Image (cartoon, helix red, strand yellow):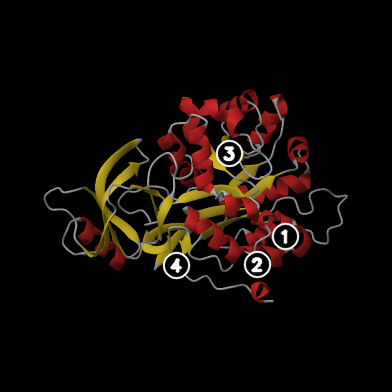
Amino acid sequence: MMSRTAAGQEDRLDNRLHKQLIDCAAGRIQADLVLKNGRIIHVFTGEVALGDIAVINGYIAGVGEYGAHGEYAGKEEVDLAGCCVSPGFIDGHIHIESSLLTPSRFAAAVVPCGTTAVVCDPHEIANVCGKVGVDFMLSRTAPLTVYGMVPSCVPATHMESSGFRLSVDDIDELLERRDIIGLAEMMNFPGTVAGDSDVLAKIFSARSRGVLIDGHAPGVSGKALQAYVAAGVSSDHECTTLAEAWEKLRAGMTVFIREGSTARNLEALLPLFRTAAVHRCLLVTDDRHADDLVQHGHMDFLLRRAVELGADAVTAVQMVTVNPARHFRLDRLGAVAPGYKADLVVFEDLKRFRVGRVYCAGECVAENGNMLAEIPDHPHNQT
């Protein structure tokens, strides 16, 4: 049904389904679903406009003006009564293990909050279970889309004795998986800067495949930062001050702004929202504990928090939709536009972000905080 040009990245519908998408967009055939009368958040332009969204085969065929002549017709039509519609929320950096939930239970917790995709680094479980742990963390999460990054530092240091080690050969093997899209945070920044042969072998493995390398560089500055970026590291989620964030942005890095259960840097880095560099910034959780997920939410909480602190709401939405999709080269995610996957979130307003409905590939999978879709349990959930 789909073809891919790189691991984990959806390229295009097959020809038959793509033809149906075009026919639906042109109005020649009915959509499977039309969401009508919604305030659509156009992440490419920063506008919010009333409109309809036509969906077929799990993808957006077209976006039209509400009430206009020749509006889209669907087999199912839902009146959103002026509620906001945005692309599904994407958490660009999380360790699912920190939630103390299995992947299936994590998915059940975050999808009703509007999260439709996450990029996870399973290095915590890899330290104790190796490749088997990576397999476990990337399984049974539908309808949540989980993209994996290969843990780069297992163990974190040579002094640890957690039980497992991911060698360069292991990393080579994992990078061939369809659900793996890059090399996870390179915590060994001293080894990277010093040109350690084992560290560089891991980096070169990722570079040879053209996939991204995430960073982990708290306080790294000056020539050390320049060498770290020159190695091919694309991002950092450890910035705690504006000065640190600006130096990394100038070096070409994407800055992941954390607001999780442990590290909270949003308030300190909030001024970035009002700069030309905001398109190079994401909102991420890094770690989100189960009690916080239940009591406060996931990416919806980050949006509420950003707006409470004075951020522009649409800018915040861009930082959890189109910005992570662009950074991770997820070309069919992150926007309400023709040809994009119909991962959509319906919520009341741009202040409270109270999620009403969540659509994954055009199917309503959650409503008013309740999961509608069934998620197969891991065996561990049944004991």
Q: Are marks 3 and 1 in contact (CB under 8 Å)?
A: no
Q: Nearer the viewer, mark 3 or mark 4?
A: 4
> In terms of secondary structure, where does tag 2 sit?
helix
The amino acid on which the numbered mark 3 sits, given as a three-letter code, is Phe
Extreme residue toward the left, this view: 69
Residue 372 is marked as 4
The amino acid on which the numbered mark 2 sits, given as a three-letter code, is Phe
For the point 63% across and 46% down, which residue is it? Answer: 286
* Crowding at mark 4 (Cα within 10 Å: few <14, some 14-19, many 20+): some
The amino acid on which the numbered mark 1 sits, given as a three-letter code, is Ile
> In terms of secondary structure, where does tag 1 sit?
helix
Residue 352 x %, y %: 45, 42
For the point 63% across and 34% down, which residue is it? Answer: 265
Distance of mark 2 from mark 1, alpha carbons? 9 Å
Q: Which residue is mark 3?
A: 256
Q: Which residue is mark 1?
A: 125
Q: Which residue is mark 2?
A: 136
Q: Are marks 2 and 1 in contact (CB under 8 Å)?
A: yes
Looking at marks 2 and 1 on the same chain, the residue that comes earlier in the sequence is marked by: 1
Distance of mark 3 from mark 2, alpha carbons? 26 Å
Looking at marks 3 and 2 on the same chain, the residue that comes earlier in the sequence is marked by: 2
> In terms of secondary structure, where does tag 3 sit?
strand
For the point 44% across and 67% down, which residue is it? Answer: 372
Distance of mark 3 from mark 1, alpha carbons? 22 Å
Q: Quadrant of residue 313?
A: top left
The answer to whether residue 18 is left or right of residue 144 is: left
Residue 259 x %, y %: 60, 40
Q: Nearer the viewer, mark 2 or mark 4?
A: 4
> In terms of secondary structure, where does tag 4 sit?
loop
Looking at marks 2 and 4 on the same chain, the residue that comes earlier in the sequence is marked by: 2
The amino acid on which the numbered mark 4 sits, given as a three-letter code, is Leu
Residue 93 is marked as none
